[in-house]
Amino acid sequence: MPKAILFDLDGTLSDTVDLILDSYDHAVFEVLGRHSDREAHRHWIGRPLWDTFATLYGEEAAKPMVEIYDKWNMEMTPKLAKPFPGVHELLAELQEAGYRLGVVTAKRIHAAQLTVDSVGLGDVIQIAASASDTEIHKPNPEPLLKGAEVLGVDPADCVYVGDAVTDIQAAQAAQMIPIAVTWGAATEAELAAAGPAAIAHTAAELGVVLRQTT
């Protein structure tokens, strides 16, 4: 029976998908003088910034884009990041029930902690693994395995909850139970095709799914 529940951050616990897309667009416009393709960038949410920018625009453009993105995103996060309805209550219930809870995110630690604090979740969940903790990132299982290590549990005793296909793939590779939520970056069809153990449409439904799974 699972002892720990790990969560992706952006699009799963925090309503920040639009903020991320706006941050991508700001960085691309500042460096290249044109707007980004929001749908193309949406599929890169959950991956490290360098990988995203280097793949889409080349390594020469990637360095200034990462710096501009990071600065603008950090400035805007306290203003624009929002909690998803019911998430704080759900995490508090899970915490009270004795589950170990942690965030595993492709964000670097300073940005991840700012996001958690900005959406008011700092009292109910900790950052278990960020992009600052591993050299390889989702969909590779290494970040999730690091998160399980930090929480002191075996990966087989973990659930991982995420809103992106890479979250599901990483959980499967880590031998964790993958659960998808539909209020983030990926469509329900994209998530279903990845083969999660369950799909939740609201925080309340996620609570039911987690109780049935654990």
Image (cartoon, rainbow, N blue to C red):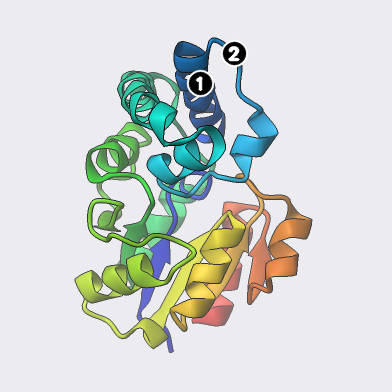
| Residue 207 visible at all | no
The residue to which callout 2 is attached is 34
Q: Amino acid at mark 2?
A: Arg
Q: Residue at x 52, y 62 (%)?
A: 167
Q: Look at mark 1 in the image and give the residue it sits on.
A: 28
Relative depth, front residue between 104 and 170? 170
Query: Which residue occupies the foreground of this view, 89 or 41?
Result: 41
Q: Residue at x 73, y 50 (%)?
A: 187
Instruction: Tell me: 206 left or right of 79.
Output: right
Q: Measure how far apart labels 2 and 1 are at the Cα level.
A: 7 Å
Which residue extends farthest right? Answer: 189
The structure residue drawn at horizontal position 63% and vertical position 77%, both measured from the top left corner, is: 197
Residue 135 percent across, percent down from the top left:
28, 59
> Regarding mark 1 in the picture, which secondary structure is present there?
helix
> Residue 138 occupies which quadrant of the picture?
bottom left
Q: Give coordinates of residue 200: x percent, y percent.
A: 65, 61
Task: Give the residue drawn at x 51%, y 15%.
Answer: 32
Tell me which amino acid carries mark 1: Val
